[in-house]
Image (tube, coloured by chain):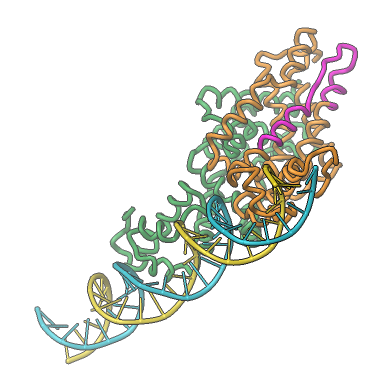
Chain colours: A green, B orange, C cyan, D yellow
DNA sequence: AAAGTAAACTACACGGTGTAGTATATTCTC
DNA sequence: GAGAATATACTACACCGTGTAGTTTACTTT
């Protein structure tokens, strides 16, 4: 866990070690079952040092959560291309989305966070609010395609939500809930293809 | 909480009281934050009595979980009707599904269970296995419609999953995750309608 | 280069709290 | 009057967060 760059001060390095250790522990055991002693041990740091950097277990957790949300946010961007077939563009969008939400780390952290949502609601509201405030990139893509006369959509927010549902319904949520086995590449592609076709069958203009 | 029928022995009544109290407490606070003392207090029963009926906190939880799964199982059934329009039938199916999965109690219990899935995995595997083994009723409905020549579906399991995804993606999972507000009747109907139309646009035969 | 210094880290002990499960002596219920 | 329920107190344990005495790090001064 000591990936520290040598330019940083000792204190800064320790801080990063603590964050990394906490992330790993939370990922493995969840918030409740992770003790500050374990985090300190894993970070090779005294427990006191942990408390010198973070005033409480909650504060440390919030720091991790914020980090995670920020990483999430800067992951997706989509630009509408009038020259390419909608099917290709949508498939590409879907692949990226699926890629992201099926990563074991992503699934694990998501699980950890919302297991605690109710206990941290006030703190998380801010984070979630901030993370989701920005417009949905897919919604913008749809608006562009509509303006270009290639889709027929009344409520683009709803349409974007439906497309997302199609992808996550089989590949993400059941993993979160913990009652689904991992999906193969083959299965993922089948879902993506079906989602794209369902979307275009309903919203496409040329048929 | 004393809904006990008077035909039962005292011991049996107490047992039911304990189960009811546990269910309520778990629902309100989750498994971890519910103490056996609280359950006993709510059931108006001594703690020792709780332990006479259930050997441990886990055992009591499993009893509740099993009860919940059984209730779930016997909720849905669908029959294909060659005389009625597909759209009407699908809408009906969707409404029932949505009705079920948006009930606050259902959402709450689901949350409680899968928060603990990882800690009870072995025990839950059995229950989940048993609950989900039966064929999906929607899948059967689709097969019937295909046999009747009114749908064109290659993989009915996939098709059923996609339809389910459309419904749950906006109305169920976000509630479970805890980052969505409650949906109005109006919003539910919008999602249902959109889901039905997307499904028929892709799988319907007459267009 | 050696000495000095402030800030950060370590090891360790301890108070306080919550809670699963048990023990015991007493009272109800049928 | 026997089997069950009750009240109460107890054990065992895990874990958060704090206080402290002493050491290390990194930077400054001489």
* Quarter of the image where one finds residue A36: bottom left
Residue in the picture at 71% in, 29% down: B164
Image side of residue B35 versus residue B8, left or right:
left
Task: Name the one closer to the observer, B13 or A91.
Answer: B13
Residue A150: percent from left, percent from top: 72, 30
Image: D21 above or below D13: below
Judge whether residue B76 is colored magenta: yes
Image side of residue A47 versus residue B179, left or right:
left
Residue B71: percent from left, percent from top: 75, 32
Image: A50 above or below B106: below
Q: Determine if residue A139 is in view.
A: no
Image side of residue A26 versus residue A163, left or right:
left
Task: Name the one closer to the observer, A177 or A132.
Answer: A177
Q: Quadrant of the C terminus of chain A?
A: top right
Task: Name the one closer to the observer, A132 or D11.
Answer: D11
Residue in the picture at 53% in, 28% down: A183
Judge whether residue B114 is colored magenta: no
Image side of residue A6 versus residue C29, left or right:
left
Q: Determine if residue B105 is in view.
A: yes
Residue in the picture at 68% in, 17% down: B156
* Quarter of the image where one finds residue B89: top right
Residue D1: percent from left, percent from top: 70, 47
Task: Name the one closer to the observer, A23 or B76.
Answer: B76
Residue in the picture at 48% in, 48% down: A29
| Region of the chain picked out in magenta, as a range | B65-92
Q: How many marks?
A: 0
Residue B176: percent from left, percent from top: 68, 44
């Amino acid at each position: 866990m000591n990936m520290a760059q040598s330019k940083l001060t000792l204190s800064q390095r320790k801080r990063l070690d603590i964050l990394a250790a906490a992330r790993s522990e939370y990922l493995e055991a969840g918030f409740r079952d992770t003790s500050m002693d374990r985090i300190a041990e894993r970070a090779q740091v005294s427990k006191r040092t942990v408390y010198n950097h973070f005033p409480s277990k909650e504060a440390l957790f919030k720091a991790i959560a914020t980090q995670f949300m920020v990483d999430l946010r800067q992951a997706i961007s989509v630009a509408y291309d009038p020259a390419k077939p909608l099917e290709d563009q949508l498939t590409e969008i879907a692949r990226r989305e699926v890629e992201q939400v099926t990563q074991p780390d992503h699934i694990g952290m998501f699980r950890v966070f919302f297991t605690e949502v109710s206990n941290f609601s006030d703190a998380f509201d801010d984070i979630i609010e901030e993370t989701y405030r920005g417009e949905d990139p897919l919604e913008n893509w749809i608006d562009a395609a509509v303006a270009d006369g290639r889709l027929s959509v009344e409520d683009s927010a709803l349409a974007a939500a439906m497309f997302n549902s199609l992808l996550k319904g089989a590949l993400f949520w059941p993993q979160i809930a913990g009652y689904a086995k991992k999906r193969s590449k083959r299965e993922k592609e089948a879902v993506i293809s079906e989602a794209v076709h369902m979307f275009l069958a309903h919203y496409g203009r040329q048929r």
